[in-house]
Amino acid sequence: MGIEGNIKDFPLIDVLNLLSFGAKTGVLLISGKKNDESLTGEIYFQGGKIVDAVCGKKRGEEAFYSIFLMNEGNFTFKTQNINITPKIDKSFDNLLLEAIRKADEIKVLYSKIPDLNTLLETNPNVEASEIRLSADEWQVLNLFKEKKSIKDALKLSPFSEFETLKSIYLLLSFNLLTKAEEVEIDLSKIIPKRVISPVKDALSILGLSQPKTTCDKVLFKVDGVKSLQDIANELKISQKEILNCFIKLLKETKIIANISLERIKSIERLTKEE
């Protein structure tokens, strides 16, 4: 039996129950989103029992729980022989009950912590050694030695989403983590310089290379004297447009700038959030 559909029209929990009740063997492929992040996953069935799951770098139960939390996307079940060593030992009912419990607890945690795009950093004014933390909680705290969004920390954490969120909530409660200051960008103080490219510069001088895109026009204006604000004013483009081009040209190594790597990362995060 092959089935396919959309999670919104046919909830994943109903699909899982259908495959289990029908004692199906095969793989359920899911492509969807969780917290606006694209995810793909696979759940392996053997005689109606879930024996393994894969989602990103996760495998087994943790992968299954990540897939279970997807709130939108499409699924396809393919009937096929499964010849793998089982990574999941729980019965179908117990696995599903645990997934539902974790989903409920995660919803509560999300309601207690800031938005996922919020930048957090360790609080230097609090002595962490005076507070008892588990080894796992220390690892989560160390994720924020450099300013980082909660969303990025979840991606980097070696622990499950639930365990990581629980640690972040605890660390915020102890004031060991604090919201990072908002990035203030003064375009008038950012002065980009062109990276020398003899061939392209010669073509430009000869008038054989004319700017076509907005970012090409920005590059054409870069002379090592004009600030980003000057260039934005001349081209009559918004702050968002000039910053997007600024990051793009930096990545293409067409320009260099008089600002720190940390500030560049902050600007890049800001442009992505917008």
Image (tube, rainbow, N blue to C red):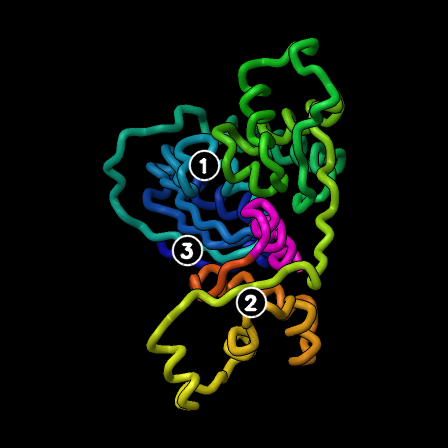
- Image quadrant in which you'd find residue 237: bottom right
Which of 97 and 207 lies nearest the eye of the viewer? 207
Say left or right for 107 vs 11.
right
Say left or right for 115 vs 162.
right
Precedes in sequence: disc 2 or disc 1: 1
Kind of residue at badge 3:
Thr
- Image quadrant in which you'd find residue 135: top right
Residue beneath disc 2 = 224
Residue beneath disc 3 = 76
Which of 244 and 103 lies nearest the eye of the viewer? 244
In the rendered image, the residue lying farthest to the bottom is 207
Task: Give the residues drawn in magenta, as a range.
Answer: 258-274
Q: Could you tell me residue 97's position as x and y percent? A: 57, 29
Residue beneath disc 1 = 63
Q: Is-magenta flag for residue 75?
A: no
Q: Could you tell me residue 195's position as x and y percent? A: 44, 65
Q: Could you tell me residue 159's position as x and y percent? A: 51, 28
Q: Could you tell me residue 213's position as x and y percent? A: 52, 80
Kind of residue at badge 1:
Ala
| Label 1 element class | helix
What label does residue 85 carry, if any? none
Precedes in sequence: disc 3 or disc 2: 3
Compute the Cα span from label 2 to label 1.
50 Å
Kind of residue at badge 2:
Gly
> Which SS does the magenta portion mostly show?
helix
